Structure formats: C-alpha cells, structure tokens
Image (cartoon, rainbow, N blue to C red):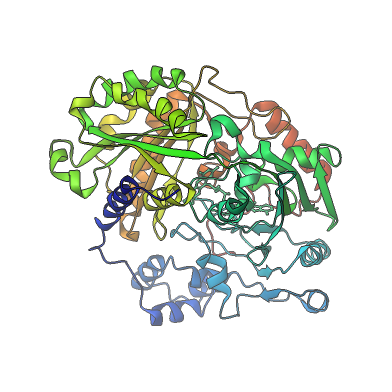
Amino acid sequence: MKLGSWGASFISAMQSLLLIELAETSNKLDSQDIKLIGSVSRRAFLSKGIASAGSLSLMSAVVGSQVLAKAASKGGLDLCALQSKFKGKLLTPEDADFNKVAFGGLWNEIHPKRAPQLIAQVNDENDIAHVIKYARANKLKVSVRGGGHNWCSPSVRNSGILIDLTRMNKVISIDAKTRKAVMQPIISNREVQAALKPYDLAFPTGHCPPVKLSGYLLSGGMCWNQGVWGPAVGSVEAIELVTSDGELIVASADQNQDYFWAARGAGPGLFAVATRYHLKLYPLPKAIATSLYYYPYEDMEAICDWLGPLARQLPTNVELSFGILSAPSKLADKCKSSNGKTCCVSATVFADSEAEAHAALSPLENCPMIDKRLSKSVQQPADFESLFDASGALWPPKLRCDVDALFYNSTLTDIAKAIKDHFLTSPSPKALVFISVFTGENVPVPPPVDTAFSMTGNLYGGPWTMWQKQTDDAQNKEWHEKCVQLLSPHVCGHYVSESNTVEHPDFAKASYKEANWERLAQLRKKYDPEGIFFAYSDGLEDDFGA
Ligand SMILES: Cc1cc2nc3c(=O)[nH]c(=O)nc-3n(C[C@H](O)[C@H](O)[C@H](O)COP(=O)(O)OP(=O)(O)OC[C@H]3O[C@@H](n4cnc5c(N)ncnc54)[C@H](O)[C@@H]3O)c2cc1C
C-alpha cells in the first residue's frame, strides 16, 4: 500500500516540528580543551593542585564523555588470556575509538559521567561466553549494550566490561509456513517489518524505526497493534542466552523456564545476554489506515471527556493516542493563545479490509468538537514504512532527553487536568506528552501471566522531554520532574525501559508487580550469585569511573 497524500502531509507536518529549533547552535567544545583535560584523571587533576576555579568550571563544562572514559582506565587488565580466544574487537580507554563506541552509540545525547574499563565488541555467542568467563576470572562485572536506545543509558556503568552487541545484526531465518522467525538482537523495528513484508507477515515491533529488538523485547514491548497482538513479549517463543557462567542456553516454555520468564520483562536488570529471539509472526494486516485531528489546546478537557469513554467502544485493532505538543508550523498561528501548544487525537487501525478500517475509524468524526478542529486528515492508507516515518519524526535522534512512560488507571480527563497548565510552560518545543488510550471493552488487559513484565493500565505514556542544548539541561530536567510529580497520583506502574531508572532507581521496582520484583531478585541470586551482571541500580553513580 502506498503512502497516501495524508501520509506525506503528516510527515511534513511532523518534520516541520523538528525545524523549529534548527536555528539554535549546539554547544560544542573545542577539541583542544578536551585533549588537555582528558590527559589527566579527575583525581590526579585535583591532587596536582591545579583545580583553580577557572579550570574546574571548564572541567565541569566538559561533560564530554572523552574525559570520562579516559579517567575510567584502571590499567593493569591483562587481556592476553581473552584476546587469544576472542574474535571481535576489544577496546580500552587508550584506544582512539573507545569514546565513540562507549557513548556515540547512545540515543540520548546526555552522555553519562561513567565509563567501562573495557569494551568487547562481540562477533557471536562464543565471544560473549569468553568475555563473561574472563570477567568472572578477573572479578569484573559486565553490562550489555544492545541498540543504546534506552533513554537513560543504563548500558554504561562505572567500570567493568561493556559487551557491545552491535555486530550481532542478522535475520537468521524466516519460516513463512509456520510463521516463525529467528533474529539476532540488533535488528531495528523498521528492518523487522521490511524483512517480513515480502512474506505478508508482521511482528509486534515498537513504534520508532531505529529501536532494536535487543532491549525492546526484554522489557515488555509496547507495540503497534498491541490491542490485538498483545505486548511483544507474548510473541517471543524462545530466547537464546549466554548465562553468568558463560554457558549458551535456550530458554522457552519447555526448558530453562526461569530464564524465559525473567528475560521477558527484566529489561536492564537481566542476568544473562540474549543472543537470538525466536519470534511468532502474524499475517500482515491488509488495510492499515490512520486518522489525525488537531484541536485547540483550550478544548483539551472536553476532547478527553469524549475520547476516554469512546475508546471502550472502538475495536481493539484501533491504536488510539492523545497527544499534547507544540503545534506544527502550519498551525502555529492558530495556537498563539496557548503558547503555540495544541492537542491531537491520532488513531491507526490494523484491519483486513478497507470497509473494516472505515467502520473502525469513523466514530472519530463524531467528536462533539469536530467543528473546532484545527486540521484533520481522515482514514489515510498507511503501511509500516509510513507509520515509522511519522513516529521517527516525532521522536527524532540527536537530542537530549528525559523520559518517563507510565501506566495509569485514572481517566484521560484526569491526566489532561493534571498536566494541562504545566505543559504550557515547557521550555522545549520538542517536548511531548503522549498517551496511548487502550481500546476495547476489556481494558485494562491483563499482562501475560508467565512473564516478568507485569504492568498494565487503561492508559500508557507520559512526558517525552527532548531538547537540544546542554545549557538547557537543568531547566528541562526540572520541568520534566514536575510533569512526573503532577502525574504521579494517577500512576499505577512504570515501564522499565522508558523510565528514568538511573536517576530514580525506585522506578525500576515500580515497573513490576511486587511478586514479580521479588521473583526477579530471587532468580538473580540463584543464577548470578556472584553478581557478574550489574543489577538495576549498580554502577550508576555519576563519577569518572574512579
Ligand atoms: C525513539 C525511541 C522510541 C521507543 N519506542 C518504544 C516503543 O514503541 N515501545 C517500547 O516498548 N519501547 C520503546 N522504546 C524504548 C526501548 O524499547 C527500550 O529502551 C529498549 O531498552 C531499547 O533497546 P536497546 O537494545 O537499544 O537497549 P540498550 O540501551 O542498548 O540497553 C539497555 C539495557 O538493556 C539490557 N539489554 C539490552 N540488550 C540486551 C541483550 N541482548 N541481552 C541482555 N541485556 C540486554 C542491558 O541491561 C542494557 O543496559 C523507545 C526508545 C526510543 C529511544
């Protein structure tokens, strides 16, 4: 199905959002400064008595990872034993590419002030096993980097070995007859759907094009067409893993069940490395279509009063969202009274015929405020490509971010009331509050019973606070924290991979039912008693790795 004219205009509208701040220049540091400061460790820097006020302020300005990575060098690691067996690439802080790999692969441009001692870019499972055995022998911990898309960058810990999976990026097999596929972790959402499309098949991928299966599938997987397909972990039939002993295992409903349970939800707290995912596939919906309506900010509560109850009457193959955001440039003039902010209703149906798609999306035309809409595009044909283009424009790369995506059992109107005034003060035009309004009669849908992932709600989403300049960090982070605080009375759970579990370790616990959180802890003790894998909150203190 071709991207319709609506698709093109939606994308250009979304892209125009991105242009708003293009005039702003980024806060680049002079490379000579980086070199100068990077040549001494923080402690040496201070003990040599050269920490004059000026030097210190220069140093604190250099949050640049280059400095931090160098300071993390512990020296003394004898890599010979590992190098003889290892086929991938090992990088120490002395290597020119170390910083690029440690930090350049992160989605969030706010780079952590921590660094590993060694990065192992693995070629395959055997490399992973060698690294883990080496870590064990040398009393080092390991962290895992999948696609680097977790908003709070938990893959970077203080010290230890970072296992970088970037090279494990192959689709191993697709069996159209049995509707099964096997994929390595570093395959993106867009690549998954593109690989399956020739077979008229699909998988419940996430919404943004570049996010990789790796950490997405370990977290729960908030996916396209979730109302029908369920969270993506429910469509993972087996996972190949390397354990804390360096053993290669397959976890499924029939074998290594504890691992299978944990790996489908533990996210950044998994005590193993996932190397292959065995996926259950679905027929590609034949008629995907999208409607999008922008409304005046002032009508937000009335829209929510109507939309919340309507969601119960819509079929589950309608993915419905309510967004609060800066108006696209073509609507900016109409939104002057609300500081350039607007709200939108978007709905995507995954149907099998145009008639079914039409019937499912038509109720959105009956909004009591329809005459007050700022713009609308109705029932435009779409495909995964165009859906990814649109999402990719709303969540663009190369930004500084703070994100908390939450589950709620309150009404949509309660959420709107909680955030409406505060959103008007957002320091960045790229900030969004996006709420998925789950559809169908049986909301909230219980999460799969046999997975660590255990959260559900009527609504899901929250503030995606994104901005460009380092000098705006404090203001945006403060604004974001206030959003979370205002929403908190309505929150029934966090999502472990879209919550700031680094600055708020309690958000990891809040991502699970109590029994699941306890079981995860027990399994960690049982299967990784020496703590080879960093636990959720280990090694996250901001330091120079010292
Ligand atoms: C633009 C954008 C859009 C997003 N949209 C969605 C969405 O629609 N739905 C959704 O559910 N999520 C979404 N996310 C969140 C994303 O799925 C998670 O943050 C996920 O963790 C990213 O996977 P990753 O491999 O890049 O993780 P990384 O940042 O590489 O890793 C995070 C942690 O996960 C663990 N990990 C990752 N891979 C492995 C592995 N193979 N084995 C063991 N441990 C591993 C490690 O502990 C690591 O510290 C989005 C994120 C972004 C940036």
Front-most of residues 443 and 292: 292
Q: Give residue 434's position: percent from left, percent from top.
A: 39, 37
Q: Residue at x 20, y 49 (%)?
A: 329
Q: From this view, report whether residue 334 is shown above or below residue 44.
A: above
Front-most of residues 380 and 272: 380
Quadrant of image for the C terminus: bottom right
Q: Give residue 192's position: percent from left, percent from top.
A: 59, 53
Q: From this view, report whether residue 142 is shown above or below residue 475.
A: below
Relative to 3, 123 lies left or right: right
Relative to 391, 78 lies left or right: right
Residue 97 appears anywhere in the view? yes
| Quadrant position of residue 61 | bottom left
Q: Residue at x 32, y 18 (%)?
A: 305
Q: Give residue 487's position: percent from left, percent from top.
A: 40, 29
Front-most of residues 533 and 204: 204
Q: Give residue 410's position: percent from left, percent from top.
A: 44, 20
Residue 536 appears anywhere in the view? no
Q: From this view, report whether residue 48 is shown above or below residue 153.
A: below
| Quadrant position of residue 524 | top right
- Disc count in the image? 0
Q: Residue at x 56, y 81 (%)?
A: 96
Q: Residue at x 67, y 36 (%)?
A: 234
Relative to 137, 334 lies left or right: left
